[in-house]
Amino acid sequence: MGKDDQLNGVPLTPHEREVLLTALDRGYFEVPRRISIVALAEEVGVSDREVTEHLRRAMAKVLNHGRWQLPPERDE
């Protein structure tokens, strides 16, 4: 992946980047949401299943990158 495929240092595929940035721009993460998965899928030109997969993968990469990395689970 090249530098252009990164979002603040997080390596994303071009599809993950497009879907994540479009979701942010269109208000998918707001409460209440301003766009549905179906409408988001229509906007980026893929199925709603693909949008969901791209969003989940992108969010996992963002959360697991750098300071957002979750601590390992501890056995108690």
Image: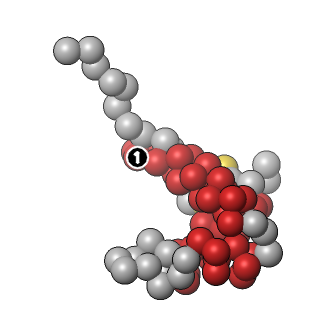
Q: Quadrant of the C terminus?
A: top left
The amino acid type of the residue labelled 1 equals: Trp
Residue furthest out toward the top: 75
Tally the numbered discs: 1
**Residue placed at 33% from the left, 24% from the top?**
73
- Residue 11 percent across, percent down from the top left: 66, 50
- Residue 61 percent across, percent down from the top left: 56, 47
**Residue placed at 79% from the left, 49% from the top?**
1
- Residue 32 percent across, percent down from the top left: 37, 80
Badge 1 is on which residue?
Answer: 68
Q: Mark 1 Cα within 10 Å, few/some/many (few <14, many 20+)?
A: few
- In the picture provided, is 24 more to the left or to the right than 6? left
Foreground of the two, 39 or 69: 39
Q: Is residue 4 visible?
A: no
User: How does the figure colour the protein chain or chains?
Assistant: secondary structure
**Residue placed at 44% from the left, 72% from the top?**
29
Q: Is residue 33 visible?
A: yes
**Placement of 29 over or under 66, stated as above or below:** below
Residue 18 figure quarter: bottom right
Residue 72 figure quarter: top left
Secondary structure at numbered mark 1: helix
